Amino acid sequence: MILGRSFFRMSTYNPLMRLEQRAAEADQLIEYLKQQVQLLKEKAIVQANVREEKKLMVENSKLKNDIEVLKKQLLEKEKRRGVPEVAMPLADNGVECISKPATPKPSGPAPSASPAASVQSTPPKDECKKKPEKKGVKAEKKQAAPTQDEAKVDVSRLDMRVGRIVTAEKHPDADSLYVEQVDVGEESLRTVVSGLVNHIPIEQMQNRMAILMCNLKPAKMRGVVSQAMVMCASSPDKIEILDPPSGAVPGDKITFQGFPGEPDKELNPKKKVWEQIQPDLRTDDRCIATYKGAAFEVAGKGVCKAQTMTNSHIK
């Protein structure tokens, strides 16, 4: 009897032990799964933060590029308006000084307003907006240094030639302007607009020799595109077209002793090359056209002169 009871107790005890053991194992498994779920949540949060950080970095880089573009556009507009140079902060906490070339002062007295100041085909302002830089280019990237020829600003950069005004007639929409067809030694004639109506009779404009500057950027004047500029001695009350030497023919180059070099194909209005050179162009006391004392010369043929005007500016 006692032995039977012992067997009964053993038979009921073993299943209970197994159930308790399995319950403990189940608890451990649940705890492990909870830990894994928590790790996955933390990992997802970290990945989301990384993605957000990358997105913010891309947006920040774009904003920096936009700021640099706007800053350069502002500096360009200030240069056109003649604002003095301004120190601009760089990303590395340094200071960048934007240099602005000063216009050379003429050796003679300051010129007063000339009647031809607004009538010659002067270089127009470049109204094209500056293109934004490509994305990914560092904002602090320094601009390429100018070449030696670009850095040099003297009369050798002007393409001056002997020309012949074949015909001249009044501008259809402007009483003070002539429209001329000029031979400068090329296959076709160039159209030139000049504000000389009030200073030179139209009969004196026909079939006459002159000096032309041929590498200004073409400019539209009252609907007519002017492709060159007639060079004149100028004062507040008088204007005279410069005459080439006897024997000169259309296309002959004007040279200047002491200023060698090839002219620009077309002057860049942004560089203000003409504006820096023009104050040093003037006639001397013998009516000879000069640049800093060097005569306008056609090799082997002589110098260019005004008819009567001495010590006058040339425009």
Image (cartoon, rainbow, N blue to C red):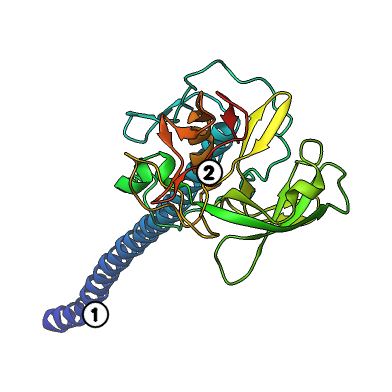
Badge 1 amino acid: Pro
Which residue is nearer to you in this view: 302 or 94? Answer: 302
145 or 88, which lies in front? 145
- Residue 120 percent across, percent down from the top left: 69, 42
| Alpha carbon distance from label 1 to label 2 | 98 Å
Residue 67: in sight, yes or no? no
Res 15 label: 1
**Label 1: few (<14), some or many (≥20) within 10 Å?**
few
Name which residue lies at 45% across and 58% down: 134
Q: Is residue 145 left or right of residue 21?
A: right
Query: Residue drawn 55% across and 59% down?
Result: 250
How far across and down, in percent of the image, does residue 190 sit? 65, 62
Question: In the drawing, what numbered circle is on residue 281?
Answer: none
Q: Is residue 133 left or right of residue 166?
A: left
For the point 47% across and 47% down, the residue is 158
Q: Nearer the viewer, residue 257 or 176?
A: 257
Q: Is residue 42 above or below residue 148?
A: below
Q: Secondary structure at mark 2?
A: helix
Against 270, is 286 above or below?
above
Q: Quadrant of residue 21?
A: bottom left
Image quarter hosting the N terminus: bottom left
How far across and how far down the image is residue 60, in percent? 45, 47
- State the residue position of label 2: 270
Against 237, residue 122 (above or below) is below
Please state the horizontal and vertical placement of residue 88, each as a whole percent of the image: 43, 29
Identity, as a three-letter code, of the amino acid under mark 2 = Lys
Q: Earlier in the sequence, mark 1 or mark 2?
A: 1
